Image (spheres, rainbow, N blue to C red):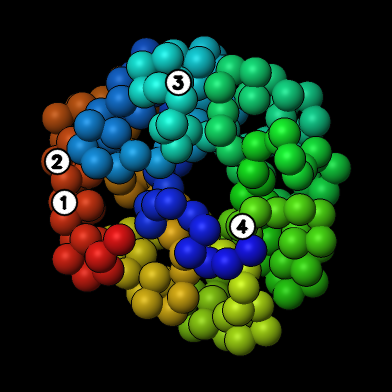
Amino acid sequence: MRPSELPYRTLVIVRGTDRDAALRTVLALAEEGLTASEVSLTTTDALWVIEQARRELGPDAHLGAGTVLTTEDAARATEAGAGFLVTPGLVTHLPHGPGHPPVLMGALTPGEIMAATRHGAHAVKLFPASHGGPAYLAALRAPFPDVPFVPVGGIDAATALAHLAAGATAVGVGSPLIGDAADGGDQHALRARAAHWRAALTRAVPA
């Protein structure tokens, strides 16, 4: 498992109360070049959103399900079309390996990171990233050089760049980018934020 394995630098977390708006958000992000999205299962009709987004974006899109807590969550999300699964913390009973979607497992401490990798995590979702910031990530990179880290929580454009510079494989961003778009808010503003985000990260950290 090498940090270069993830095919994206930004994972956008879509969570909202309006299923149609959440779907429009995923599609708008893809059109703006942010092609990796995680639809949280706390989103209204999240499985429908995943299913429709998969139908629109095709089989190769980086579309996953977030807030996966149980094997039932994993099975339903996979059936709906999720290509990867994201957990908020250690969920060590999820099936993994050939024939199962990759898991980005939540962890924070060294012990949790070891447990996540031992239980088949494809990457570690470092959550909440705001707890230790880029300096904490840099410290973790020494004992865990082969673990792909995806910091999530409190990530904006500035902290995203700092985490990438500290060795993150990708960063996960939610409300600073999504705003209220997945609740029925302004999609034009979402597209503007997405374009700005993509431009800022591309200039600083080319893919």
Asked whether disc 1 touches disc 2, contact meaning CB atoms under 8 Å apart, the reply is yes
Of tags 1 and 3, the one toward the viewer is: 3
Read off the residue under disc 2. 192
Of tags 4 and 1, the one toward the viewer is: 4
Read off the residue under disc 1. 196
Q: Position of residue 113 (x, y in %)?
A: 72, 67
Looking at the rendered structure, which numbered label has been put on residue 123? 4
Asked whether disc 3 touches disc 2, contact meaning CB atoms under 8 Å apart, the reply is no
Q: Position of residue 146 (x, y in %)?
A: 62, 73
Asked whether disc 1 touches disc 3, contact meaning CB atoms under 8 Å apart, the reply is no
Distance from label 2 to label 4 (Cα)?
29 Å
In the image, 21: left or right of 104?
Answer: left
Residue 93 against residue 111 in the figure, above or below: above
Q: Residue at x 45, y 20 (%)?
A: 54
Task: Judge by depth and name the residue closer to the eye, 112 or 147.
Answer: 147
Instruction: Pick whichever of labels 2 and 4 is earlier in the sequence.
Output: 4
Three-letter amino acid code of the residue under disc 2: Ala
Residue 5 against residue 191 in the figure, above or below: below
In the image, 174: left or right of 180?
Answer: right
Three-letter amino acid code of the residue under disc 4: Ala
Q: Identify the image quadrant of residue 107.
A: bottom right
Distance from label 3 to label 2 (Cα)?
24 Å
Distance from label 4 to label 1 (Cα)?
26 Å
Three-letter amino acid code of the residue under disc 1: His
Quarter holding the N terminus is bottom right
Read off the residue under disc 3. 54
Instruction: Pick whichever of labels 3 and 2 is earlier in the sequence.
Output: 3
- Is any atom of residue 129 visible in this view? no
Judging from the image, what secondary structure is the residue with disc 4 in?
strand
Three-letter amino acid code of the residue under disc 3: Arg
Instruction: Pick whichever of labels 1 and 3 is earlier in the sequence.
Output: 3
